[in-house]
Structures are given as C-alpha cells and as structure tokens.
Image (tube, helix red, strand yellow):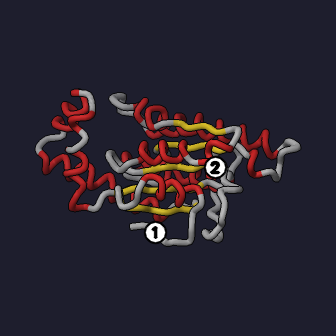
Amino acid sequence: MLGGHSALCFAPVDLCRALVSGVAVIVIEGIVATGKTTLVKAIERSALWQDRPTKVIISEHYTERVLELTSPTIAERQALLAEHLSIAQTLHKRWAGSRFKGNNALEPLIIMERFHLTHAAQVGDFAPFREFDAALRELGGRLILLHHPPELLLQNIMATIPSRPPMWENWLRSLGSEKDIEAYFSQLQRRCLEYYEQSCLDKQQCLAYSLSPEKLAKNTLFLRDLGDLS
C-alpha cells in the first residue's frame, strides 16, 4: 500500500472528454530526446495552463536525474517518487476538502516530467512502481509516452550532443560504440512501451516529433479520442 491507496486497477474511462477537468496530474514519459521538455514548454504557453491559478511542474531533474550517478536502490527510487506524489495528493486533498471542490477550473494541476515508467524501465520491473500508478489513477492521472521510431532512435539521441554540456557526450561514449548506445536506449524504450501497456492511467502515446508541440500540448490537455498517435 502507498499512502493508503489501493493497487486496484480501474476500468478505462471515456477518453473523449472535452476538457482536462478531473485531472490533477499529467505524467510525461519517454527516453532522452523524445521532446518531453518541448512538450512541457508548449503546455506552459497554452491558455488552459495560464488560466489555471494553481499549477506545478516538476522537471526530470528532480523526478529522476537527481539520483544519477548514485546507483539508487528500488527503495530509494520509491522514496523519491513518493515525495513528489505527496505534493499532488496534498494539493488535491486541500481542493477536495474546500469550498472549491467541484470547480475543476480551480483544481491544482501538476505536470511531472518522467516518473514511474522511467524508474521501472531502468530497473526492468514495473511491479515495484505499480502502486504509484494506482495512486495517480485516484488523482485522475494522465500518462503521455513519447517514443522514437526505432530507425531514428540513435540519430535523434546523437543529435543532442552539440546542444548539451560535454559531460553528456562523455557519458554517452562511456556506454561504448554507437551500436552499444543504440542497444542501451532501445532496451529502455521497449520497457517503457511494455509498462505503458500495463498502466491503469488514461494514456496516449506519440512518436517523437510527429506532431507540432502545440498540437501535442492540445492533445495532452484535451485527450481526444484519437487513439495512440504513433
């Protein structure tokens, strides 16, 4: 059990909702260079985001990268995610227990760039993070997974080198040859896709860069009944 939340997986709800009402958390997942940060910035520019009085963005620096180079245990990963989840739960509880309950325009909205799928993919097991999925579901959580076409994965990742600090290239090269780099990230992406299918959240997946950031932001906030955008 996580914070008193059941691990029960609810049946999917209607994905044709016209508004983001009832959603407290949006989780944006995907391996490196899939456009997660670009999507977050596009959401920030949207009228719906700007009109929402209480909103929080927790970047991948604190949902995952803060543990880089530490060889974190599963328990340490769970503790980190629990800290961030508690922010969403506390804000939602305040809203639900106030006179604003039912006014979805005033419900706090939290975006998490990377969360439980990333950690599950890194350890190769979704089971230790399934209760986070259930807890997010109780908050009306929504999952967006961005992924590379397999034939473009290595190209897209290597294209990030000129715009990032030298430490990034050094780390990439530490994985071995370009074939080794491709194999490493391909495995992470396959796991993300596998665990995406196991998630109980309202969800949508999209090929990286197949939509403009603005259209993808709109689809994220207004989750149309378009099927997976892949």
Rendered residue at 88%/43% (across/down): 99
Q: Nearer the viewer, residue 38 or 184?
A: 38
| Front position among marks 1 and 2 | 2
Q: Do labels 1 and 2 touch, CB within 8 Å?
A: no
Q: Nearer the viewer, residue 208 or 123?
A: 208
Rendered residue at 61%/45% (across/down): 49
Say what amino acid the circle numbered 2 marks: Leu
Rendered residue at 36%/46% (across/down): 122
Q: Position of residue 161 (x, y in %)?
A: 22, 37
Q: Which residue is mark 2?
A: 48
Q: Position of residue 30 (x, y in %)?
A: 39, 51
Dot 2 falls on a residue whose secondary structure is: helix
Q: Earlier in the sequence, mark 1 or mark 2?
A: 2
Q: Position of residue 106 (x, y in %)?
A: 75, 45
Quadrant of res 151: bottom left
- 48 lies left or right of 67: right
Residue 6 appearing in the image: no
Q: In which quadrant is the C terminus drawn?
A: bottom left
* Separation of marks 1 and 2 at Cα, in angstroms: 23 Å
Say what amino acid the circle numbered 1 marks: Asp
Q: Which residue is mark 1?
A: 228
Q: Position of residue 171 (x, y in %)?
A: 22, 33
Q: How many marks?
A: 2
Circle 1 crowding by C-alpha within 10 Å: few under 14, some 14–19, many from 20: few
- 188 lies left or right of 177: right
Dot 1 falls on a residue whose secondary structure is: loop
